[in-house]
Image (tube, helix red, strand yellow):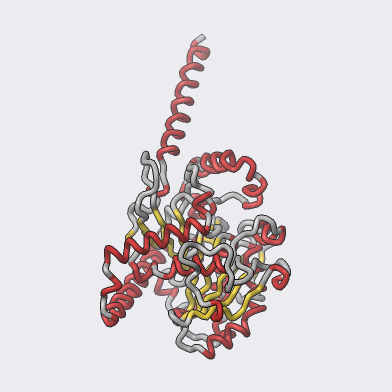
Amino acid sequence: MSIACCCPVLECVYCLACARWAWQKCLYTAGHESEHWGLATVEEFEPVPRLCRLILAVYEDDLHNPLWAPPGGYGINPDWVFLRRNDQETEGRAPPYMIYLDHENADIVFAVRGLNLAKESDYAVLLDNKLGQTKFDGGYVHNGLLKAAEWVFDAECEVLRELLKKNPSYTLTFAGHSLGAGLVALLVMVAVQNRSKLGITERNRFRCYAIAPARCMSLNLAVRYADVINSVVLQDDFLPRTTTALEDVFKSLFCLPCLLCLMCLKDTCTMEEKMLKDPRRLYAPGRLYHIVERRPCRIGRFPPVVRTAVPVDGRFEHIVLSCNATSDHAIIWIERESQRALDLMVEKDGVMRVPAKQKMVRHVSLAREHSEEHKAALQRAVALDIPQAYSPSTYGTFHEMEGAGSSGGSSERGF
């Protein structure tokens, strides 16, 4: 009799616990993840909207007569497009891309398009993710994206080498969205490991901007390459937070909210320490830039704020239950909101009126701050006992790691 009386009490406790969890998850917003991060500056965020427009330009068949240009146009000179590859030329090994010589900014830009829902080959690349089964440079990476990155590097290595030789003062920037973001993140890692093939000795001539990337590398690599890779995430975007196999995500597009809720429950029941100690768990790469434009319990969009950090723990670990989780992944919205954020930063900072000499000083100061923040993240990764994490003293100038790392054709696979 006493046991029977306890059952309603246990049910009530269980229901209250579930209701509390659901209430907290509904109140949880993406802004909580980055509330303690620092604010991005104009100098570091300036390339983002420009590169978003370059990625959008890859979708066009004729840049002299664009059909899908955003308001204000792409802001590029079609005659500076050096090379373009479409689906037929890539043979389905990688999404279409182009190489653009940005003479105004002394930059060679390698822009890669995002996922094309009508192309089976794009799905083949993204869904070949055999989580944690491909080793690279002391960590684990996304299997299909690494294959695509290696193929692209082998195909365009000589082209990039010649361009860098003819433009010795230019930087080499890789930029991509969604599927392309994961590809360029691994492509820049392959390029850094094979600098001699490109005729480059300085690591700081490489840059990568991964817009709304998939989780494609283990935590030790995500932190280690934060001096090269920058990931940009708009508010509630689901993909950088998706820890489940992407195959399950796209199979469940007809009921994606249901899948996101189940993933949310699973992540809640997983201890954070266990997640951090899992060497095969994949993460969004590099330094993170989070564009926040909505606030809890408020309607509409507010002036966007951009926060940045190189986090080790709390690295977009939780799915946000939001009606904007998929729309925030669209490159059109990211370009629009990043441009709004940049315009507000410029207006507030008055950077356009800053003398050139002072701008140079600010660039040097920003580089020093980023370097110190990167070293602090590496030290924290070691302190948290992240698998294969290295302190800055051992990490040094990357010679030791690069000796142990693998090149495009020698990546180690643990099948």
Question: Where is residue 192 shown, x and y percent of the image?
Answer: 53, 77
Identify whether 267 is placed above or below 19. below
- With 281 as the anchor, is 61 left or right in this view? right
Count the numbered circles shown: 0
Question: Where is residue 201 shown, x and y percent of the image?
Answer: 49, 86
Question: Where is residue 341 shown, x and y percent of the image?
Answer: 37, 60
Identify whether 402 is placed above or below 324. below
Q: Quadrant of residue 351?
A: bottom left
Quadrant of image for the C terminus: bottom right
Of residues 405 and 109, the one nearer the viewer is 109
Question: Where is residue 385 shown, x and y percent of the image?
Answer: 45, 59
User: At x 66% / y 73%, what residue is drawn?
Assistant: 85
| Residue that lies at the very extreme toward the top in this rendered image | 1
Of residues 73 and 398, the one nearer the viewer is 73
- With 208 as the anchor, is 377 left or right in this view? left
User: At x 70% / y 71%, what residue is drawn?
Assistant: 90
- Does the image show residue 267? yes
User: At x 66% / y 56%, what residue is drawn?
Assistant: 127
Identify whether 372 is placed above or below 17. below
| Residue that lies at the very extreme toward the bottom in this rendered image | 166
- Does the image show residue 185? no
- With 76 as the anchor, is 364 left or right in this view? left
